[in-house]
Amino acid sequence: MSKSEKGSVNRRRFLKGAAASAAALAAETRMAIAQQPANRPGAVVPTAAQLAAEAGPPAALVSPRIIEHPASDFMVDVIKSLGLEYVTTNPGSSFEGLHESIINYGSNKTPELLTCLHEESAVAIAHGYAKIEGKPIAALLHANVGLQHASMAIYNAYVDRVPVYIIVGNHIDAASRGSVVNWVHSAQDMALMVRDYIKWDDEPATLDHFAESAIRACRIGMTPPMGPVVLVVDKYMQEMPLPSNRPRIPRLTVPSPPAGSPDAVREAARLLVAAERPMIVAQRSARTPAGIGLLVELAEALQAPVSGIQGVTLSERMNFPSLHPLAGTGLPGYNPDVILFLEVHDMSAIARSAAERAAKTISISAEDLFIKSNNQDFQRMAEVDMAIAADAEATLPSLIEEVRRLITGDRKRVFQQRGTRLAEAHQRAREQARDEAAYGWDSSPITTARLCAELWPLIKNEDWSLVSWQWFISNWPSKLWRFEKHYHYIGGHGAGGMGYGAPAAVGAALANRKHGRISINIQGDGDLNYAPGVLWTAAHHRIPLLTIMHNNRAYHAEVMFVQTMANLHNRGADRAHIGTTITDPNIDYAKMAQAYGMYAEGPISNPADLAPALRRGIDQVKRGEPALIDVIMQPR
Ligand SMILES: Cc1ncc(C[n+]2csc(CCOP(=O)(O)OP(=O)(O)O)c2C)c(N)n1
């Protein structure tokens, strides 16, 4: 008997078994239906006959027909051609054909399928992954219901300009929707519900069309400004036999991002070189690891300070080394006369105050190349003097060249003097931060500064990566640690949608895993509770990640807002905890993580116990496993 014949016999045996269990399941379900209470008036409840039909053995399981070469195998070939290494998914019947092909078809098992317990986690994992690796992975979502669960995470990725490759199953042909559930899980225009916050979508009608749209989606998603894309794939197209004239898979060529025009770049360089107090503000400037080096070159050529938004060294990407003498906002009262914004989302406030003192502002941003109107993520109108609609990283080489060309010996001497003063200011700011970190050192709840100060010596000689947002821990990492590599920081949510932190950290740690890096997630308790099942995904897939709970037992941002309002209404702030804190009962995060199969310790409230617990957590991560340390911490 040939190998393929053996395969067919095995499959037939399986189908016989499957048909038997399906029949048993159908009988059980029919009994359950019979025991159901009568329909309430007005409730949209399927009839018993409909449910009985639904519960019958699925046609595919009892069909004697075997499809040796399903179209879904071809779809996997297309996905492979895009270099997508992983597919995150919470399973669903709208894509079971594709699911089966992903796990069984092809000799090497890529893309690897990651099991997620919530669609929001599936997309946020892909979001975090892309921020480390610079390329997307796929999130496979079940129909309109999965897409609705995922929509918050899609919006975060959209506002963060991060590519996520989303595939959604659908039952397009109404005549073939075998069950009640298939109807309620189908949509005429599936991507409509998220179209306001994706870059592109399509619902291919044929396999040829699928191949083209799959490549096009990747190309669009990867072209700055990057963003999520959605491909809706019909269930029956996945399951049909692959035609003998296999469709061609087009080649993926990602367009090189546009650089600023030579005239505009020349004028920007002229303003910067002539400035007495230039300043660079970078938010999503470094698109690739090379972006950091380019920004260092520009800053050093100009001897200009480099800051993130709102005066914080690190913004949404790792743009500039935190210990570089030019990192910071300059000397006290520096008042820049020329400001260069690099991929800054909200420059309006700085641009307005610059205009008031007749300072010049220049923006280089791909944001000007793409905008949508419904969600107001474009912020207030920024009145900049020059707007260069181009990718900042792609424009930096010509800007550096032009700046260097314009610098005379005299300007160089001025720049050097400025650089010396800026370096002193940088040093003073570092020392001040170290002093401030010591305030309340022995207090309990433990200070966020102490956590960061205790953690740094444990990781500084390792290859580490901070895969969480530092805003809610008062930006202590960027004040105390040495950030220099592109993977040292990934920024935050994008759209500020809570529920992003834990899964994005898992995705970033997944990307860091093959490089042997230690991923650190300082995790908000409110954020984790959106979809804590991602802890299981990390444990199940052995994703090394140290999660340290910033357990302030509250949605503390909201505590502060309600306190402010109560004070404004002159009613005192003593009831501001109502509806904003997460106490009574306190959540035991160590037990929660252990329940999901993860090594965990805590709650730790004595600061003396902190460092040893962190060390044990890091040891666990070095062994290739995730760990969680629950620390009772100050709110900020
Ligand atoms: C989806 C969503 N719902 C609600 C909010 C409002 N919100 C902003 S911050 C925050 C608190 C988050 O709690 P946690 O992660 O524990 O951070 P903390 O402020 O306590 O440090 C909430 C609920 C939001 N940003 N996103």
Image: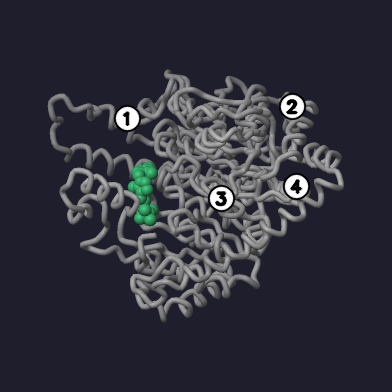
Residue 179 location (% of width, % of height): 36, 28
**From mark 1 to mark 4, how far is it between C-alphas?**
73 Å
Q: Residues within 10 Å of mark 2 (few under 14, many from 20)?
A: few
Whether label 4 lies within 8 Å of ligand 1 gets the answer: no
> Which label sits in the foreground, 1 or 4?
4
Q: Amino acid at mark 4?
A: Leu
Left or right for 409, reference 457: right
**Horizontal side of residue 591 vs 195, given as left or right:** left
Q: Nearer the viewer, mark 1 or mark 2?
A: 2
In this view, 363 is above or below 21: above
N-terminal-most mark, 3 or 2: 2
Marks 1 and 2 close (CB-CB < 8 Å)? no
Image disc number at residue 248: 2
Kind of element beneath mark 2: loop
Q: Nearer the viewer, mark 3 or mark 2?
A: 3
Q: In front: mark 2 or mark 4?
A: 4
* Residue where numbered disc 1 is placed: 53
Look at label 2 and name its amino acid: Arg
Q: Which residue in the structure is indicated by mark 3?
A: 333
Crowding at mark 4 (Cα within 10 Å: few <14, some 14-19, many 20+): many
| Front label number (3 vs 4) | 3
Percent of width and height locating residue 2? 71, 46
- Could you say which disc has been placed on residue 98 in the image? none
Residue hosting label 4: 302
Label 1: few (<14), some (14–19) or many (≥20) C-alpha neighbours in 10 Å: some
Is the C-beta of the residue carrying label 2 under 8 Å from the nearest atom of ligand 1? no
Return the x and y of residue 94 as percentages of the image width and height: 47, 33
Is any atom of residue 202 visible in this view? yes
| Element on which disc 3 rests | loop
Label 1 to label 3: alpha-carbon separation: 75 Å
Q: Earlier in the sequence, mark 1 or mark 2?
A: 1
Looking at the rendered image, the disc whose residue lies closer to the viewer, 1 or 3, is: 3
